[in-house]
Image: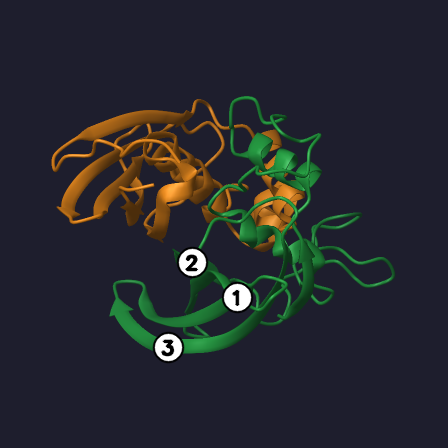
Amino acid sequence: MTVERFPVEAGHVLAFRRALGYEAAERGADTAGELLAPPTFVQASAQFDPDYPLRPVPDRPWWGSGADAGFMPAGGGGLHAEQHYVYHRPVRTGDVLSASVREGRSWQKSGRSGVLNFVETITEYVDASGAPVVTATSVGVRREPGEDR
Amino acid sequence: MTALVELAVGAERTTVLVENLTRTRIVQYAGASGDYNPLHTDERFAKDVAGYPGVFAHGMLTMGMTARAVTDWVGEERLTGLGVRFTAQVWPGDTLTAVVSVTAVDGDQATLRVTTTNQDGAVVLTGTATCRLGG
């Protein structure tokens, strides 16, 4: 995932704040001023990723239910194990960020339910001048292929 | 920026994040974040294809609500780090409560522990936040 242009829009921040249960989510939405985005807002850069897989795209099969129950896509079934953010500065409405992604560490754990594979993905968000804004590290977990879930 | 936040080791705050989480609320988060994974938005898929009892919340919904409890206390502009592990799934009907406590203060920086539990006392998220005390 690479996001070339992630404009932090007041209306988008409003919708995100509302979903997280903020009081007065509309506050500041009619200005382009100093409204700070919630700490997890950079996750919504997915909206600006042309290849984001967890969004239905017209004319492409979607794996959720319609006439039938849907299907598990190849590589599906992973879960979100951890999420870490380092804030170099707050994200504000009016920022235009970009994001680049690299793989981090990977490791295995054996437990009662079998072998679990963990993979780290690191996303660097920078502002229009290239200055760092947020470093996001996501850890995904997946059971070893072929085992019963 | 305003005065220092008075955070002392041992200080603690409890916040109810959501009562009786609804499926619609999960869909609301899906729309805002852009993560439409059917595991979270599509009961039929979650049951019949993925084999879960039903849809469950995005971990990032729980993290986002927990982060709100942290910044409501320390101030959004002071947060320097937040990291969490998702330790159990969050289901429709759940009531989530976050406990945020100060574990260390070192110069201009405070470290806080965050723990979010459901109505049965099961921990669904644990983590650490760091913040600046100064303006």
User: Which quarter of the rendered picture does the C terminus of chain A lie within?
Assistant: bottom left
- Residue B9, disc: none
Quadrant including the N terminus of chain A:
bottom right
Disc 1, SS: loop
Dot 3 alpha-carbon crowd within 10 angstroms: few under 14, some 14 to 19, many 20 or more:
few
Task: Tell me the residue at 46%/27% (across/down).
Answer: B93
- Left or right: residue A86 versus residue A43 is left
Q: CA distance from mark 1 to mark 3?
A: 28 Å
**Along the line of sight, which residue is nearer the eye, A90 or A14?**
A90
Residue at left 64%, top 42%?
B32
Mark sitting earlier along the chain (3/2): 2
Query: Mark 2 and mark 1: span between their CA atoms?
Result: 9 Å
- Chain ID at mark 3: A
Disc 3 residue type? Answer: Ser
Say which label, 2 or 1, has the lower sequence index: 2
Q: What secondary structure is marked by label 3?
A: strand
Per the image, the residue denoted by label 1 is: A131
Residue position marked by numbered label 2 in the rendering: A88
Q: Tell me the shade of chain B.
A: orange
Looking at this view, is A86 or A15 the one in front? A86
- SS at mark 2 in the image: loop
Q: Nearer the viewer, mark 1 or mark 3?
A: 1
Q: On the image, which quarter does residue B11 sit in? A: top left
Q: Position of residue A38 (x, y in %)?
A: 50, 41
Q: Tell me: residue A36, above or below residue A48.
A: above
Same chain assignment for discs 3 and 2? yes
Quadrant in the picture for residue A27: top right
Look at 31% across and 75% down and name the residue there.
A108
Nearest to N terminus: mark 1 or mark 3: 3
Q: Provide the residue designation for mark 3.
A: A106
Q: Colour of chain A?
A: green
